[in-house]
Amino acid sequence: MPALTLNNLHKNFGKARVIHGLNLTVEKGERHAIIGPNGAGKSTLFNLISGLYPVSTGDITMNGRTISNLDSHLIHRLGLSRSFQVTNIFMGMSVFENIRCALLWPAGLGYSFWHLCGRLKGVNAKAEAIIETINMMERRDVLADVLSYSEQRTLELGVTIASNPDIILLDEPTAGMSHSETEQAVALIRKVTEGKTLLIVEHDMSVVFDLADRISVLVYGNIIATDSPEKIRNNPAVQAAYLGSSIKTTTC
Amino acid sequence: MSSSIQNPGPSKIPCYGIWCVFALTIMLLPFFFTSRFSISLFSQIGISCVFALSYNMLLGQGGMLSFGHAVFMGLGGFIAVHALNLISENTLPVPLELLPLIGGLGGAFFGSIFGYLCCRREGTPFALITLGIVELFASGALMFPSFFGGEEGVSGNRMIKNTLTGFDFGSEIEVYFLIGSWTFLCVLCMYLQTQTPLGRLANAVRDNPIRASFIGYNPSHVRFLQFVLSGFFAGTAGGLFIIRYEIIAYDALGLVPSGNVLFMTYIGGVGHFMGPILGAILISILQLVLIHYTEAWQLYFGLLFMAMVLWAPGGLSWLLIVHQPVWKAGLMSKLLPSYLQALATGLIFFLGLIIFIEINYHLSLSIEPGAPLELFGLVMDGHSVVPWSTAISCLILGLWLFRHSVKMVAAQWDAVMVIITKKTLER
């Protein structure tokens, strides 16, 4: 059973048809990249899958279960987590508290107002372990608001994976990073998504071709090709529609 | 200043010491300030602390700007006064000491009803719905005199036989200790709530509701639960109000008390747990003291609120927090001269403002506008040029001097920050 199936998906904003008739299958455990020019509908697609936008028509299934038009928090509880194109963390909280907040629901604490967070030894230890994994131990008690940009992006990745989701959606995780920061980010993504299903939107072709098992090319709200990185690189339709010669210059 | 800003969250309050000091302060205050007025003031401060902290559960913790929080204190108060009357008639077997709990449950009940309506929205729509609720109750209360008592309100008698402690609560001091105990308990519970998953999630939803939903939480549900708990503590404050005053009327549900709690919380500071307590203390004292001296006390409140929003938007607690590193570095002596200068020049401006306001109030609103006005022990004639010219001179001179003083304060502050930064880097 595929991890994610998008069947004849449509999304309209008024008269604007942003996604129309999109079909996509993401297999369990694969790293699947979505590429496409600006305005192709990549972020909209992520927002549809994660429940941020309601679907106009069509179906989205996750591990065989329909999740179209479910609320975001319910989709998250089913095992899908995501990051955003613009950093999306709790800026008024420390690194530790950001991660701990993400662990409260999976720990079964719900909306408890009778447990003291300081005494949740298991949750706190797990939060420490995640901070260690994302190499932010030295910044443990620093407010997220004053972290550097790449640290904030790393923290967002930590928050995204904290609940141990089956499916991870990353929206341009290396956007705005320097070359060395990007390399570190890719290594970290590879490490924390080991054994998980990853769907990633990324503009940096070196990241895409480095990480992805399969690539889908989204142009004007529809997928024009889905294949292995090598075949996508040599696909004339893809080159004509989106990549042109840049694919060879960035990766060969 | 440290090179990286550490999290200044509420957990920074030292665990046990400060609570012992707090309890001791409540216990010892009436032995140092023995007058009836002081004890009455302390009781009022206790009620205001609970009310303001309950409001901060919405505004500070959850980012919910409510214009109708007094509705829950008022409804808690009305339920408590009816309960008190039932206890007096021996119909309800509850000791007087637990009356605030009945008010709290009433506040939580109505909090759950109106929270269900409000909490589906955030930001401006939320604020407007709460405004609608307060208007609904302020105007609708008079239509149900059997419950709200019409214009006279509903009164009760706290001197009943059914008590846990054996006191008859006929004296101010007994009432004070009962209110003080409840204040301590409520403040402790509200502080502990900030340390629970719901308390932390309220912060999370305030900061970023979208991310909150992508860690598995429904932001509306978090807001709702926070609203109900806040209603509970506001209702408890209503119950304490009944024990203190033994009467409540429809105006307790209106915009004025809702505005007052917003003043208290904002002036004290929404960003720190201690903020609303500071605000409640300051506003309660000002309210009870100013009301004896001027009819324009609400105008002064408004000016204070505007000044805080403009120059200290984080409130009194923020002012204390930003001075903490200066204090620790032993550099307060470098700031004090410029502060004193700013204070002196500010007072000149304020003096002019007071004369200006009081003469205007006297001429337009007093019973005898032709009679001379007594201000600061001086007799002033509102029809004479002297007080007007004094007021205008003080205003202009004070403002001019104050602007210069503020520049000096800013320069001194920058110099002190440079020293602190250097010291931190040397370490």
Image: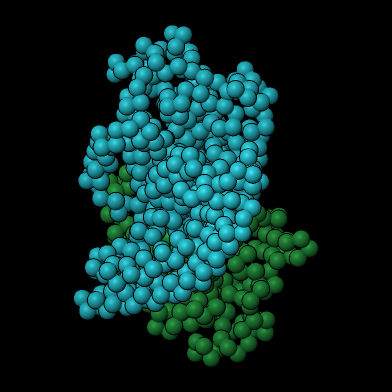
Chain colours: A green, B cyan
Q: A78 and B307: which one is in front? A: B307
Residue B329 vs B13, above or below: the answer is: below
Q: B286 and A158: which one is in front? A: B286
Residue B74 vs B130, above or below: the answer is: above
Which residue is farthest top? B90
Q: Quadrant of residue A135?
A: bottom left
x, y percent for residue B308: 49, 58
Residue at 48 percent across and 39 percent down: it is: B292
Quadrant of the drawing holding the C terminus of chain B: bottom left
x, y percent for residue B142: 66, 26
Q: A131 and B350: which one is in front? A: B350
Asked whether the viewer can see residue B243, the reply is yes
x, y percent for residue B21: 24, 43
Left or right: B182, with A58 as reference point = left
x, y percent for residue B48: 43, 39
Quadrant of the drawing holding the N terminus of chain B: bottom left
Q: Quadrant of residue A245?
A: bottom right
Residue at 48 percent across and 18 percent down: it is: B156
Residue at 32 percent across and 44 percent down: it is: A116
Asked whether the viewer can see residue B55, the reply is no
Residue at 23 percent across and 68 percent down: it is: B330
Which residue is farthest right? A15
